[in-house]
Image (spheres, rainbow, N blue to C red):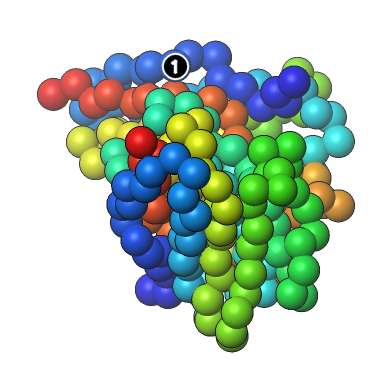
Amino acid sequence: GESVGLHLPTLSVQEGDNSIINCAYSNSASDYFIWYKQESGKGPQFIIDIRSNMDKRQGQRVTVLLNKTVKHLSLQIAATQPGDSAVYFCAEAMNRDDKIIFGKGTRLHILP
Amino acid sequence: EPEVTQTPSHQVTQMGQEVILRCVPISNHLYFYWYRQILGQKVEFLVSFYNNEISEKSEIFDDQFSVERPDGSNFTLKIRSTKLEDSAMYFCASSVAGPPGTIYFGEGSWLTVV
């Protein structure tokens, strides 16, 4: 069965507002979590990652939060822009595994 | 910025034909991967490759599939006898470090089996 999934398939956000995309995972052995952005017709693009020994990590306009207690991962995008429109996937990996496993994806729509 | 490049971008093939998808990973990367994405679905792991051999493969990667690194730059995925359900976007990816490492994806090869 799947070990990574997302709460909502589609999220609509007003331009300029903050976006929060959520992800639930079930494999407590996962050590590493990644968010990817996929624009239409393109490959997944790495956004940000976090290791299991961290709760929060910030990048440029993005923040990833990890709550290991409830096995929850979120991606926060500040001041959402039209270029943020895409499908966002969370993914997980275990240190000893040679692959990452993707969740189902959330499509982010930016409203003008 | 270095990137993973894939060819062809789109291929249409008849059922039962052999297909080879080609990839040039980022030059200093050591780990190589193939993933696929059926239209509208999530990205699925197929195979990982390191040190000239398969390190891990999924259930999808059956005997019809094979990978090869024929020279120092290319990484190929061969589907021996394509089926309709092989129609998907195939992504090559690479990473410089071992598990887990940041994996960079190519733009994909869209395979349509008719």
Front-lying residue, A44 or A61: A44
Q: Is residue B56 left or right of residue B61?
A: right
Question: In the image, residue B4 lies at what x, y percent?
Answer: 45, 67
Q: Is residue B85 visible?
A: yes
Residue at point 44% right, 40% down? B15
Residue type marked 1 = Pro
B17 w.r.t. B94: above or below = above
- Toward the viewer: B69 or A72? B69
| Number of callouts | 1
Find numbered disc 1 in the image and state the secondary structure of the residue it sits on.
loop
**Which residue sits furthest top?**
A8
- Residue name at image x 56 percent, y 58 percent: B78
Residue furthest to the left? A112
Judge whether B94 appears above or below A84 on screen: below
* Residue farthest bottom in this picture: B72
Neighbourhood count class around disc 1 (C-alpha, 10 Å): few under 14, some 14–19, many 20 upward: some
User: Which residue was labeled with disc 1?
Assistant: A9
- A52 versus B4 height, above or below: above
Instruction: Classify residue B94 as left or right of residue A25.
Output: left
Name the spot of residue B66 as percent of width and height, x first. 65, 58
In the drawing, does residue A67 fall left or right of residue A86?
A: right
Task: Give percent across and percent down for residue A91.
Answer: 62, 38
Image side of residue A74 versus residue A79, left or right: right
Which of A98 and A17 lies nearest the eye of the viewer?
Answer: A98
x and y percentages locating residue A110 in the rendered image: 24, 26
- Position of the C terminus of chain A by quadrant: top left
- Quarter of the picture holding the N terminus of chain A: top right
Residue depicted at 72% across the width and 25% down the height: A3
Residue A32 visible, this angle: no
Question: What residue do we see at 47% from left, 27% from top?
Answer: B41
Q: Chain of mark 1?
A: A
